Amino acid sequence: MISIIILVFVLGYLSITLEHPLGLDKTVPALFMAALMWALLAVGFHEGWLTLIDGHETTFKAINGVIDEHAEEGFTNLLLHHLGKTAEILVFLIGAMTIVEIIDLHRGFEILKGWVTTKSKTRLLWIIAVLAFFLSAVIDNLTSTIVLVTLLRKLIPNKQDRLWFAGLIVIAANAGGAWSPIGDVTTTMLWIGKRTSALHLVERLFLPSLVNLIVPVTLATLFIPAFKGKIKEVKISEEEKETENLLSSKTMLFLGIGMILFVPVFKTVTHLPPYLGMMLGLSVVWLVSEFIHPEEDFSKERRHLYSAHKALSRIEMSSILFFLGILMAVAALESLVYGAVMVDGELTSVGTLRYLAEMLNQTIPNQDIVISILGVLSAIIDNVPLVAASMGMYNAPMDASVWHLIAYAAGTGGSMLIIGSAAGVAAMGMEKIDFIWYMKKISWLAVVGYVLGYILLLFMESL
């Protein structure tokens, strides 16, 4: 049964990577493998074939079809736990995308577009990449990717050219998120888990993350023709100019970005999950969007064109469902007991991903190599369970070098594949980036940046 569940994950993952050759939307295999994996877990559990594990290292099992009350409750709570964690990300994503779409409907991004006056593709790449690097450190890599890909649509009319820029945004956003305690969910985990302090994280990871940004962007400008030449200017009709003058574009732009920037502040002050802050921000933006236009300027027939309802209709729900499927599939894999390892001198049952991490640690004696491999694995498997596993693997004090290495590896390693990070998945959904195309065209840039940044971090930690 364990082998079948892993096989379903592998085949589902393969179907996602071969989306275009198969002519099948990636959302279908993602949802299918998630539902099937949990169904197999349930059947195996009730028949007594499988032992499952929850997030607190407790195992539970039904023996010969006789379901222990604690085990039944544990299985239900396990599913709800993972669904809750996934829902947090999805609600956050929906909130951020809706705010961005409301800003776009009010032509707020035209203001940003007006600030970017360069027509040089090379210069534009550097501007966008640096924006992504610093913006993701403040509002997280997922939200900054959504904002900047939306801005790209205003600046670059050619879709093929836009794909290249979107690929570099993913690398830049992940690099920026790695050196900030609120820039990526994995660094937040390490920060909240008291594995690293905010000051030490920034101090140690800023330069390696900067290398992870500068090297790929430099290589892209030198060797990739798509970043040479001029951008074709987008013509704006008189009607659009008139609409832009009538709408309070600046108000919605600054309010929307301000509410997104407010989310990490809300989290720091209240210690509540970020999605609640995003919901608060969305409600404020939504409220203002309902009353910002004078009645004499817009008839009731036209007001709906700028409402939040219109913004919600523009969100790619297939991307949301894809995220749901792949995160729940990884959760199923994480919950499946695959083996037992020695933890703090005791034999402890662990999930598949934790078992994989522990086996790597036992097989390869060099800790630095193990962590670098975990970074590569984060491009294939969700980096959250990998970081959670590594937090249980190492018994190091706060601000030890191992935590800085893990933060960098998990934060930037996901750039190697388009579905290796939340930023990549968001860009993939918004611009319909093909998995194979990204792997052929962008992955090598991410690999070079990752390796050089990791080497610099090792050198800094050795001083």
Image (cartoon, grey):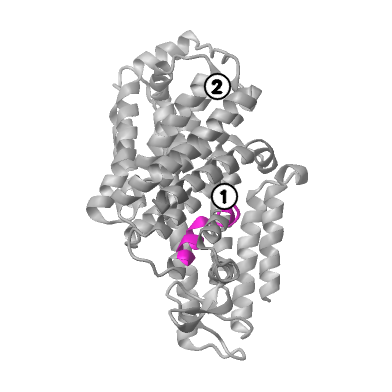
Q: Is residue 51 depicted above or below 132 in this figure?
A: below
Note whether 172 is above or below 193 in the view shown.
Answer: above
Q: Which residue position holds label 2? A: 156
Q: Residue at x 45, y 83 (%)?
A: 345
Q: Residue at x 54, y 88 (%)?
A: 67
For the point 36% across and 51% down, which residue is it? 275
The residue that disc 1 covers is 420
Describe the element under mark 2 as helix, strand or loop. loop
Q: Is residue 65 above or below residue 78?
A: below
> Could you tell me if residue 408 is visible in this image?
yes
Q: Which region shows up in magenta?
A: 376-390
Left/right of residue 188 with respect to residue 165 in the rendered view: left
Cα separation between marks 2 and 1: 25 Å
**Depth check: 224 or 124 in front?**
224
* Residue 216 badge: none
Using a 10 Å C-alpha cutoff, classify the residue at mark 2 as few (fewer than 14 neighbours), some (14 to 19) or many (20 or more): some
- The residue positioned 61% from the left and 64% from the top of the image is 35
Q: Quadrant of residue 307?
A: top left
Where residue 336 sits: x, y (%)? 57, 73
Residue 386 among those drawn in magenta: yes
